[in-house]
Amino acid sequence: MNDIENLAEYLASERLQLCKAISEHKWYLSEQAGYDVGYQFAEQNFIENILPTFANDFRARYCNNCPEQTQHGILCHAELLKAS
């Protein structure tokens, strides 16, 4: 399998995991509200309120020891995500 296929497989897996997390978040929001809040609302709420925490946790765990950062003297992938 080449790098493009590996990347496509990885992105598909990540997309699936993200959709599952948003669906679970929708369920919790709907239970709290007492009605179905809808996927779009849950997705927006997830992006605004949940995803930043995951990104910060990821950077705290992995950026300090990122081989890309230490071997090449460049910003690692997570730091590039933070900058965007």
Image (cartoon, rainbow, N blue to C red):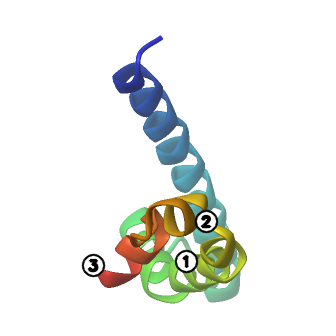
What is the spatial separation of the Cα atoms under label 2 and label 3, in whole angstroms?
18 Å
- Checking the image for residue 65, the label placed there is none
**Considering only order in the chain, which callout, 3 or 2, is on the residue closer to the N terminus?**
2
Q: Residues within 10 Å of mark 1 (few under 14, many from 20)?
A: some
Q: Mark 1 highlights which residue?
A: 55
Q: Residue at x 72, y 76 (%)?
A: 61
Q: Which quadrant of the view contains residue 3?
A: top left
Q: Nearer the viewer, residue 58 or 54?
A: 58
Q: Is residue 67 left or right of residue 82?
A: right
Residue beneath label 3, please? 84
Find residue 22 and report its horizontal and vertical position in percent: 55, 63
Residue 83, horizontal then vertical, whole percent: 32, 83
Q: Nearer the viewer, mark 2 or mark 3?
A: 2
**What is the x, y in percent for residue 64?**
65, 79
Q: Residue at x 44, y 70 (%)?
A: 73
Q: Which residue is mark 2?
A: 66
Percent position (x, y) of residue 38?
44, 68
The amino acid on which the numbered mark 2 sits, given as a three-letter code, is Cys
